[in-house]
Image (tube, rainbow, N blue to C red):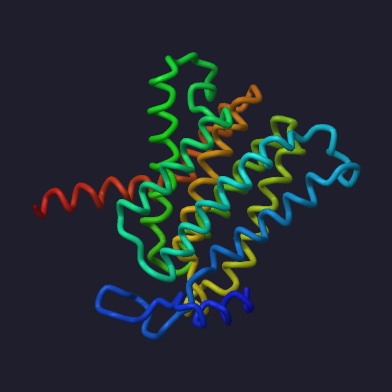
Amino acid sequence: MPLVARIAPLIGAIDQPGERRLNRRAVPRLGGVAVFIGFHLGCALIFLPNWSPFAGELDERWWFSFLPASAILMLLGAIDDIRELRPLAKLAGQLMVAILLFFADFRFGRVLGIPLPYEIDFIVSTLWYLTLINAFNLIDGLDGLAAGLACIGAMGIAGAMVLLRQPADALVLVSLIGACLAFLRFNFYPARIFLGDSGSMFLGLTFATIAVCTSTKGTTVAVFGISILAAGVPLLDTLLAIWRRSVRK
């Protein structure tokens, strides 16, 4: 994290104080890059053959599909942290990632085992990814809020997986918890680094994907429910923001 904080100012990833900002001094962004790296390093250790006692129970195909998709979204967010992208360009990148995951068979229609027509499944799955990505992105305005919610949500999902006798899958959530806790050490007020779009969008995508994938494996309706609860605050914040803007108009 300190390394990312030193590099960020050199490439222009700085959040300057202003009327709409809560920070009173310039704070580096790109904390999400460190969260991304920490999470996937943890996954690499988990999915290494013959290393983990749960190796035979893990489905590495999930990680092999999620890694490139999340890397694309993280890079999109990092570019936005350095030089603010136009909203349409940002949405186009998010849409591309959502479509990639859909064709990787991470589909919303599989969540509760309810077959959906292909076109409906495509629309619902895409909206699911876009909603959670932008929900976490919009709520990332206070020190420690987005990463803290992600950490609490990941703990809940990991606990549910252990209760459902899926300890191998819980290890993936442990990686996310560890990455978030490491970041929070530097993000609590007064923050020394911000999560940035690179991190908030990555966290939203992670929860959206885990909810779809874990629910595909069977008796995991509880996991899906906790994923919704974890994203409940950012989703509510998103809906309230839309409502407030519509009222002002």
Q: Is residue 195 above or below residue 130?
A: below
Instruction: Tell me where residue 197 sits by quadrant.
Output: bottom left
Instruction: Tell me where residue 118 sits by quadrant.
Output: top left
Q: Is residue 7 above or below residue 110?
A: below
Q: How many callouts does the rendering have?
A: 0
Q: In this view, does 247 lie above or below 31?
A: above
Q: Residue at x 35, y 53 (%)?
A: 89
User: Residue 49: x and y, percent?
Assistant: 87, 42
User: Residue 159: x and y, percent?
Assistant: 66, 41
Q: Is residue 73 left or right of residue 1?
A: left
Q: Which residue lies furthest to the right in this view?
A: 50
Q: Residue at x 8, y 52 (%)?
A: 249
Q: Is residue 203 left or right of residue 124?
A: right
User: Residue 80: x and y, percent?
Assistant: 41, 64
Q: Which residue is drawn at 54% across and 17% down?
A: 113
User: Residue 109: x and y, percent?
Assistant: 49, 22
